[in-house]
């Protein structure tokens, strides 16, 4: 429910920005002149506009999500990604919009955006007494406009800023559920009616189901910048100061804590082929299960991919997951240009487990899939992939970690089958498949 709620806020923000900015260069009167055309556009693309009330310096209307398929196509045309499953889940949702013109020194346009009801996919479910009670409380929240996004656009309609109203709510039922969201703000730029930059901040968020689960996020930031004509041409990233997760059941209690987690990605498109890189880090990850504790320090993960066919990927995203033949055809199309993937580094510098502190491990890997790979042939003869796939993996383990892993019977057997090299007190495993030949630590085995 929470994930869906945030998705709705993002989707509505994009929709309303498009609604109020496309083709408009002046303020107030020109925006009003544009409104009718933009409303007609929305109505032609899966939305319905209801209860519109226009006054001199403000107006009110309701946007209703009516046709999921048209809505998906519409957002795709505006550079906003949304799949059909999510759009279907939003069918029947109604969003209230209160607009004010020249509201302050900064704003040409100010908006309050708030959901009026839950989607029909939720309200039409077969519910027990407990579910109905929760639904009734959620509807009361919506009636009070407890979930509300405020957005201000500057005089040139070239930038915007806003916030999500703080939420402090407790849902009463068989188990009490509390959730709090504080300090959500955002700001961005608009270019030719589309978001070209978006920065977001979240000060604090907690979710607590008594005796079941607890989640806490602190100081989350994210950024997005469009860098080219394609909606996928972009740089983006995020950082989170701390995440705490707790899960409780009748037999166990699991705690996970993550400190200073961040990630960045860069994607560029050329000739409909994508090149993308991802970098992620975390300073600490702690685990505790029924009193048993472990700790990972200095985590780094980098990943690169090249020659990803975006047209085929888009078709694959829209395909019926139950149509195996169609999925296989599209995957074959996806790899038809040859895909190269690389993990420049996956590293955990320090590990604490079973009362011991030790150095961790590092891994590098790459895989090149030749465009000659035939999936149909692969299903009948897995060995057909040997000449079409080249891969190389190198793992370096500290001797202490290797000794700890070797205590597991299955791992011991694997380590016997793949003997390591030992350099500077570290265990090294290097496996390479090239032109149909397999080698381990430089020795051919196939």
Image: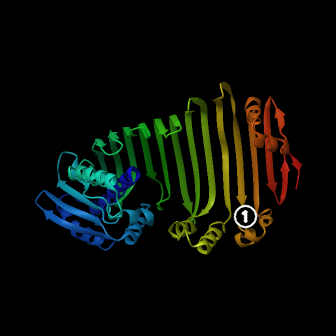
Q: Where is residue 439 in the image (x, y as percent from the top left)?
A: 85, 50
Q: Position of residue 44 (x, y in %)?
A: 31, 74
Q: Please determine whether, in this image, residue 331 is positioned above or below residue 111.
A: below
* Front one among 415 and 304: 415
Residue 264 seen by the camera:
yes
Q: Position of residue 83 (x, y in %)?
A: 45, 64
Residue 151 seen by the camera:
no
Q: How crowded is mark 1: few (under 14 residues within 10 Å), some or many (20 or more)?
A: some
Q: In which quarter of the image is the C terminus?
A: bottom right
Q: Where is residue 313 in the image (x, y as percent from the top left)?
A: 56, 65
* Front one among 252 and 181: 252
The quadrant where residue 98 appears: bottom left
Residue 398 located left or right of residue 25: right
The quadrant where residue 430 appears: top right
Residue 191 located left or right of residue 261: left
Q: Name the residue under label 1.
A: 370
């Amino acid at each position: 429910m929470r994930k869906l709620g945030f998705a709705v806020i993002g989707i509505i923000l994009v929709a309303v920005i498009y609604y109020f900015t496309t083709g408009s260069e002046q303020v107030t009167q020109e925006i009003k002149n544009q409104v009718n055309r933009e409303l007609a556009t929305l109505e032609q693309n899966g939305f319905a506009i209801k209860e519109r009330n226009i006054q001199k310096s403000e107006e009110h209307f309701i946007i209703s999500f009516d046709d999921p398929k048209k809505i998906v196509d519409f957002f795709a045309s505006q550079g906003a990604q949304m799949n059909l499953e999510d759009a279907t889940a939003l069918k029947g949702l109604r969003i209230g919009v209160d607009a004010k013109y020249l509201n302050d020194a900064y704003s040409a346009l100010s908006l309050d955006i708030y959901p009026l009801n839950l989607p029909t996919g939720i309200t039409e479910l077969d519910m027990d007494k407990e579910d109905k009670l929760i639904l009734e409380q959620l509807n009361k929240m919506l009636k009070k406009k407890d979930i509300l996004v405020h957005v201000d656009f500057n005089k040139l309609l070239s930038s915007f800023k806003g916030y999500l109203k703080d939420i402090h709510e407790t849902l009463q039922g068989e188990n009490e559920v509390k959730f709090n969201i504080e300090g959500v703000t955002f700001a961005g730029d608009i270019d030719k009616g589309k978001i070209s930059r978006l920065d977001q901040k979240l000060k604090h968020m907690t979710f607590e189901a008594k005796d079941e689960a607890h989640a806490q996020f602190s100081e989350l930031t994210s950024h997005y910048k469009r860098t080219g004509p394609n909606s996928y041409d972009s740089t983006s990233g995020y950082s989170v100061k701390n995440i705490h997760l707790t899960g409780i059941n009748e037999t166990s209690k699991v705690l996970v804590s993550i400190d200073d987690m961040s990630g960045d990605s860069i994607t560029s498109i050329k000739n409909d082929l994508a090149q993308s890189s991802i970098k992620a880090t975390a300073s600490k990850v702690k685990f505790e299960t029924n009193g048993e504790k472990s700790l990972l320090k200095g985590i780094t993960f980098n990943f690169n991919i090249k020659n990803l066919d975006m047209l085929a990927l888009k078709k694959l995203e829209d395909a019926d997951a139950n149509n195996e033949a169609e999925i296989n055809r599209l995957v074959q199309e996806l790899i038809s240009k040859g895909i190269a993937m690389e993990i420049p580094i996956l590293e955990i510098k320090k590990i604490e487990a079973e009362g011991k502190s030790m150095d961790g491990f590092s891994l590098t890997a790459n895989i090149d899939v030749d465009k000659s790979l035939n999936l149909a042939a692969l299903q009948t003869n897995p060995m057909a992939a040997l000449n079409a796939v080249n891969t190389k993996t190198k793992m370096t383990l500290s001797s202490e970690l290797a000794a700890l892993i070797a205590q597991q019977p299955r791992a011991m057997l694997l380590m016997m089958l793949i003997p390591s090299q030992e350099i500077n007190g570290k265990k090294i495993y290097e496996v390479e498949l090239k032109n149909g030949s397999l080698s381990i630590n430089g020795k051919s085995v196939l």
